[in-house]
Amino acid sequence: MISKLPPGIKVEQKGDNDKIMTLNVGPQHPGSGHMRIIVKIDGDYIVSCDPDPGYVHRGEEKMAEYRNYITNIPHLERPVIHDSCNILYPYCLGVEEILGIEVPERAKYVRVIASELNRCVYTLYWLAIYGIFLGHSTMFMWPAGDRELLIDLLEKLSGARVTHAYFVPGGVRNDMPSNFEDVCLRQINYFEKRIKQYDSIFYSNPILKSRTINTGVLRQNDAIRLGSTGSVLRASGIDFDLRKKEPYDVYDNLDFQTNVLKSGDSYARSKIPWLDMLESCKIIRNALEKIPKSGSVRVKLKPNPKAGNVETYKRVESGRGSLGMYIISNGKPEPYRVKISVGSFRNLICLPYLLKGEKLGNMPAVYWSLNYWPVEADR
Amino acid sequence: MNNEMPNKTEADHNKNVSQNNNSSKIIKNSADLPEFETNIANMLLDKFDKKLKIIFIKKNRIKVDVHKDNIVEIAKFINQNLKFDHAESVTGVDRPEQNEIEVVYHLGSYDPSISNQILALSTRTVRESIPNPGFDKTRLPSLRDVFYSVEFHERECFEMLGVYFENHPDNRRLLLPEDWADLPPLRKDFKIKGR
Amino acid sequence: MLKDLVIPQNANAFVSKLGDILVKAIDQPLGYAINWGRIWSLWPVHIETACCSVEFGAASSPRYDVERFGIIEAFGSLRQCDLVVVQGTITRKMAPRLRLVYDQMPDPKYVIAMGACAITGGLYFDSYNVLPGIDGVLPVDVYVPGCPPRPETLIQGCMLLQEKIKCMQIR
Ligand code: SF4
């Protein structure tokens, strides 16, 4: 026994606590992603859990203070490269507000189409990983394969596979290619048919049901108290979708509905994004009908645009819930402060709460059902 | 270098507020101010009068500045009477020219009637030129007992700007590496490589 | 020398040297065969370090399917792995863990640096928490540039690694 320990290191007390074991899940672990979860277990049951994020903390907010409003775009989309349109959305809305730019009508529709396509791309990746976390290999292969269809569409639109940098303050970077609308419509129709089949292979699967139903139940008042957002919130029975509640761009012209489930368990949380994808297909089809057939898609900004002493907080509904950008300007070409408030980071607080009393084997099912992307949470 | 800029911000804000405050205690409902938001601001002014300043009222957004001694009391009122039930983000802003660190809580609500509103509650604390996070005067009362959801946000704010939140159950490190011994990185005097 | 060892008194020494002796004996004739076996069973460790992991995941999707080339999806314990694909940015918090993972893996082991971040720091060259490339942490065999590299690029990088292993001396 060492008589004197270095400061900061504690030996656990002997006695009743002796049977409690501490387990490090991650950062090298198939069930954790880019983060570490420190769990204390008693037998097979989790006594307490302490998430330890920060393995991908890259200081985006500090970097944003050194770049001007346009050169900030590429690095601000990196936290979620597979949902890059949606993370740039609030930034562009915010910069447009402080610079006083009005976006052309056609650009607004193009933005909506791109952001809905990107939401599906994100959700499919998430679903693929959720499948493989639960040992369901087919559910990795199907979404990962279908995802490529939509990636093709976005590649046509923007030229890059995942890092599009397609949204810029003042509109979108370039117009849609000439035959995009037909191709998009065809792909979306096929895609919708495809994802409807997920119901029979994944969501009605008795193994999945037995692993996710009634695990990690988040009740409605707790969901509010913990400030959860996105699919986690809607699975707990609260109808909150920013596309409806605070419609930005042209979402108030499009008809769609929000999906709400009551049960609040992992099954409901995993089902909401899938229902949202079906809704996204509707939105895209609707937007393709209503889009003005011609017109400009971008208001060109001056080089090094400057804003006055203003601040703005804009938020949109991303694949992981509400995503806000708080931009403070002080009259320089660079923002004074950019704060990215992301859904993943807000949902992280639910994890210790949900895992308490759960079996260790259910940890991946609960953890990944939070729709959590560690890179985004760390920024 | 950027000395005058934040001062100007302050001046602008003051102008706004004085316009609102001088005429009467209650903000008049003028054409360019949205009605619903003005009502919320008036409810706050009714109750707390001198203790808070309305900085701006825009569509769906209100910003309120309060002194740090009153923040818990005002937050309780906002939570219980105005139905703002969660915090979306907690932002620390370093303002070296005024020797202050501003902390802004963006409060939202899941109540259907006001779910499109964001109330920004800002407060200020002293800024030490040589920070010693956790042991210096850069302190604020924690809002964790009022809004449970600020827990991780306040931890992040502590490590990024060195603002210690009193009564917060664990002010441990969250995102930065364990061996971080430099200044808190989001302070303006922390310079990144090559800039 | 061999003759001295093959007597009962020197049995322990013989066993301890057996590895060296075998390597010497079979290097020439069997080296090719052993390397051939290695290149078709590269097992990457499941360690994700940043956003390039999205494209790493896409590389095992049906369209790209790296398994065709003998590089198996990242699953399994690190004790059975022989390839580290560093998927992007290495932060100061992750670097010691990455080295720990590398040190725990059995020999022989190979490293692919995937993405601009893993090569030079990439987009995050001036960030306070990001290492400028992983050369200071791990010995890299193949660099795969891109931000993120397309799955095809990653597959090409893997095939380059296989070419390299073919020409290596067995250890
Ligand atoms: S190279 Fe690009 S995609 Fe890869 S980790 Fe770095 S920023 Fe992310």
Image (cartoon, rainbow, N blue to C red):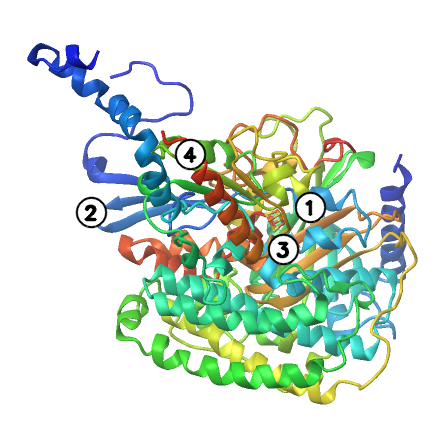
- Quarter occupied by residue A20: top left
Measuring from the top left, give residue A157's x and y in whole percent. Answer: 71, 71
Q: Residue at x 43, y 61 (%)?
A: A129
Marks 2 and 3: same chain?
yes
Which residue corresponds to mark 2?
A43
Marks 1 and 3: same chain?
yes
Three-letter amino acid code at disc 4? Tyr
Which residue corresponds to mark 3?
A341
Three-letter amino acid code at disc 2? Gly
**Chain identifier of the residue bearing label 4 in the image:** C
For numbered disc 4, what is the local secondary structure?
Answer: helix
Nearer the observer, C111 or A52: C111
N-term mark: 1 or 3 = 1
Three-letter amino acid code at disc 3? Ser
Measuring from the top left, give residue A65's x and y in whole percent. Answer: 76, 44
- The residue carrying pointer 3 sits among few (fewer than 14), some (14 to 19) or many (20 or more) residues within 10 Å by Cα, namely many
Three-letter amino acid code at disc 1? Glu
* Mark 4 vs mark 2: in front: 4
Q: Residue at x 31, y 34 (%)?
A: C29
- Quarter occupied by residue A326: bottom right
Q: Could you say which disc has been placed on residue A61 in the image?
A: 1
N-term mark: 2 or 3 = 2
Report whether B174 appears left or right of C169. right
Q: Could you say which disc has been placed on residue C102 in the image?
A: 4
- Quarter occupied by residue C107: top left
